Every structure is written in C-alpha cells, then in structure tokens.
Amino acid sequence: MLTGLSQLAQDARAWPFEQARNLLARLIRVRLDDGAERDLATALLTAGRIDELLITLPAFGRPVVFQTGYGASGLPHIGTFNEVARTTMVRNAFRALTDDTIATRLISFSDDLDGLRKVPENVPNREALALDLGKPLTKVRDPFGEYDSFGAHNNARMRAFLDGHGFDYEFLSSTECYGSGMFDDTLRLALERFDKIQAVMLPTLGPERRATYSPFLPISPKTGRVLQVPTLERHVARGTIVFEDEDGTLTETSVTGGAVKLQWKPDWACRWAALSVDYEMSGKDLIDSVKVSSQMCRILDGVPPEGFNFELFLDEHNQKISKSKGNGLTLEQWGRYGAAESLVYYLFQSPRSAKKLAFEVIPKAVDEYLQQLDAYNASLSAEARPTARIDNPVWSVHGGAPPAKGSPLSFSLLLNLVSAANASDKSILWGFIARHIAGATPASEPLLDRLTDYAINYYEDFVRPAKKFRAPDERERAAFLDLADRLRALPADCQDSEIIQNEVYAVGKAAEFEPLRAWFSALYEVLLGQSQGPRFGSFAAIFGLSETVRLIERVLAGEDLSING
C-alpha cells in the first residue's frame, strides 16, 4: 500500500503535482512496450489507482531523468536558478506521487561549449575578453582571474549557489559530454540522418541563413573558434565532415570527441536523446524551439521529454532579463534582502504568468511566505482539507519538510519598526522584540533573527532614501492629539494590538475621515514618511505605547522626523 502522502498527491491541485501526473502518464506511454500492459496502466492512472499501478507493473526500468539547462555565457541569475528550483518541485511531487518507488535523477546541464558571441556588460576586463570572441566558453579566459576559463568560472558560480541551497542534482557540461564521447553515438546518428535534420531546420530559417546552415559547428583546429560554416562533404563511414576553415583551407574533422558541436536546437535534441531525458521545462519564448527540437529528437531515435512552458521574468522596467545585460536581480541581491525560501516561494507562484524580478517584490514575497508557512502548520490539524498540506506552496518550497515554526512578526512590521526606531543595529530591534514577545531571543526565533538583518538592509538601501515626511493638516493634527490622549489612557504595558487598533479606528471615525483608509495613510505618511505600512495597532504594540506617543508629540511639536527617521 502507498503512504497517505501518495494518496493525497493523486488529488493535489498544485501545479507540480499536475506535472508529476503528466510525467507518470508519459512513462506509461513511452516505456511500456506491451499494448495490453500499457492500456491497463493508463486505466489505473486515470482512475487514480496509482497504488495498484505501481504494485502490478514494473518500475519502468532506468531512473526518471529531469533536466535543466544553463547558458554559461553570462553570470548565473535568478532566471537560471528558477529552472532548477521549479524542476525540483516537480521531482519532489513525482516522488510523493509514486511513494518514491521509482528512482529519479536531476541533471543540471551547462552549455559551456558554445562560442562566446559577445562580451557581457557586467564583467571586468571586457577588452581582454573580446580577444576570445568565438571560442568555446571553456576556452575563453576568465575575466575575474579565478578559474581556467570563463565557462569554468560561471559553472562554479552556478554550482556554488545550487549547493548552498541544498539542491540534489548532477552537474554535466557540454564540454565534458562532447569531449568524453558521451554524445558520440548520437552524433554519428545525426551525421547519418543529416538530410532529415536539415528538412526540419531549414524551413525555420531565413533565406540567407538557410543557404549556409549546417547542424554541425566545427571547432577550428587553427583558431580554436566555433565556426558557423556550411558542411561541404559528409563521410558517414568515417564519421567526419569537411568544411572551409577561416584561412580558406578545406579541413576534414570528426563529428565525435569534441571536434564539433551542434547548433543549439539540434544540440537540445541530441541531449534529450543521448541522456534519455524524461522531463524538462522551458520559457514561453521557446515554445516553437521545443517543437522543432522534439522533431529532431525523434529523428535521433529519442522521445521528447514531458514538460511545460513558463512565462518570462521581467526587470523593474518590464524588460526581459538577460545574463549578458545583467538586468533584473542577482541571486546575491535577493539574499541580501530576503530569505532564500521566500525566493523559492515567489518562483512557485503562478509559473504561467510573467513575474517581475525587482527589489520591490521582495518584502511582499517574504510576508506571503510567512503567511503560507503559518497556514501549512495550521493545516496539520484533522479539520483541514485533506490536500491542503501538500497544495500549500511551502510544501514544494521545502521539499515536503517545511519548518514547524515561522516568525511571530511580519517582515513589513519589522521594516516599519526599523524606520520608527532608526535602528541600524539589530540589537536595538531585539530590544523591542524581547519586550513585546516574552522570552524571545535570536536563538529561540532563528527565522525572525534572519528577518531583522534583511529588514535593516532593505530599509537602509531602499526605504530610507525614499522617505517623504509631510506635516499634518488641521484635521489630522486634531486626530493625532486625540490618538495620543487615547494611547496615554491605556495601560502603559498594553501590548494587545487589537485594543490599540480599535482606538486607532475610533479616532479615524470620530474625525470623520472618508474613506477611513485616508486616516491610515496619514499615519504612515506623517509618522513614518511612507505611503503604507502594517496594521498600526500591531506596530504600536511592538514599538511601545510610550514611544508611539512620543513620535506623535514630535510631529505635533513641528519636529522634522526626516533628520533621524
């Protein structure tokens, strides 16, 4: 019998589980040769009887291969990280669905044999790098002076980040696969079926490129550059092609052993066939490329993988992010202002909708992650909807093992506390926190402690420079006086945010603010120099009633809060 988790996975609505079920259907379709066996397996899957499916049928032979691709021509960015994170979500959902009875692999593949087409804008020593244009990335000098090549540098950066986040993956590079002979059989088949590949590719090209196109890109033995030149002769028995080198000489070279590489669409097809890839996702901009590569994969005796197309990532100007331009956020930048799990949560959300990767999205993502974590832990009760636990994003964010405890304070509340307290040192923040939450320490609240660092960094870099305080008008001054009197009337040690919030509401209603949110806007704009903030009652409860009253008194006295606020 399967575990309860596997039973839940059959009915889960979250997109990774939908993808996992699609993948299981592919395995039945592709790996079961016997028609009756295939029909039975399909019927069991359709009926949701996966326990019977896995008991009565073989384990589909070899491991299920998930793959992600990385273009090593530029520094890794969040778009690159996204593919590994989202594919891992599908892999974990598949493991839950099948009760981990089918082995899986995740390959992170680097296209580091590509020729360097242009010098990235976000690297040092660009002039020196320009001397290596056209060479494979693993033969281009490292502009940072740290590794044997630019490709090795970028691969190391990618692997370090994936390792730092605990991803379970196998790293493969194009240089390694071509050079070691791993792709040799598929390359020989591509040579044999050259005309069939051309029949797929040529209709997709413009007239000028079509006239000289070849799926094979020879690497010049004289200059070391990857050449886009016609294939003049093919010798299938010898496994070679003839091309014109840069100096005009005719050169015969093997298609194996790393002497050539394939154009990227045939290369994608080659990889799918040679590595027996079962699942790979890609951006919406590659839909047509997937179709073309799928045709060539079949020509190479492979079966195209299951997968789906996600929407693109945009920078703060709604432009597509690019490794070479370096726009959008870097992995390190998100890590300065938000927890890594909040990034993975952000990537989980709505993969078929375009997502902006800009600094402004981080606070909201952090708070939504915290809310979902609280909801997940609440769903562990018997009263919750059966699939609520695994449909919650944090199940996928944490690979099925979310932490049992979140943060007692929201990120937005911490940001406003930093602002009001002018706290550039986290010890100041912890002074307020410890007074508000009995027994709270950095050791007892590790996530909250991390959030204090993020909040200080975000405040100093983005909030403080954008602060715009304004003086209250006459009606607002009267309301602030009323609020100060009401807060003084409460017990000095009152930390009940609801009681405080009720007084704030009462002031706004008594002053006839219409709509009432205009009163809350005034609170934030006058006291914090911001257009919005968390529930004011929660803020005052942790900041302290006496400190909140003092803040109001400073405003009423005409003091300029922008000097130290």
Image (cartoon, grey):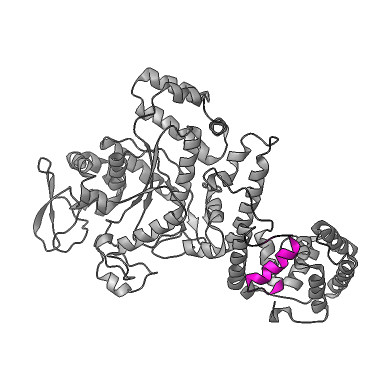
Whether residue 539 sits left or right of residue 112 in the image: it is: right
Which image quarter holds the C terminus?
bottom right
As drawn, 83 above or below 100: below
Residue 214 appears anywhere in the view:
no
Q: Position of residue 365 (x, y in %)?
A: 60, 56
> Observer-nearest residue: 298 or 85?
85
> Can residue 424 be found in the magenta stretch?
yes
Image point (47%, 21%), residue name:
43
Q: Quadrant of residue 304?
A: top left
Image quarter of residue 208: bottom left
Q: Residue 295 at x, y = what percent? A: 31, 38
**Relative to the observer, which residue lies in front, 490 or 239?**
490
For this view, does 158 lie left or right of residue 251?
Answer: right
Toward the top, the furthest residue is: 36
Nearest to the observer: residue 475 or residue 380: 380
Q: How many discs mark residues in the rendered view?
A: 0
Q: Position of residue 516 (x, y in %)?
A: 82, 60
Magenta part of the protein: which range?
421-441
Q: Is residue 305 magenta?
A: no
Q: Is residue 420 visible?
A: yes
In the picture provided, is 229 more to the left or to the right than 126?
A: left
Up-down relation of residue 558 to residue 429 (above or below): below
In x, y percent, where is residue 424? 63, 74
| Rendered position, 272 above or below 475 | above
> At 48% across and 22% down in the image, what residue appears?
52
Q: Quadrant of residue 296?
A: top left
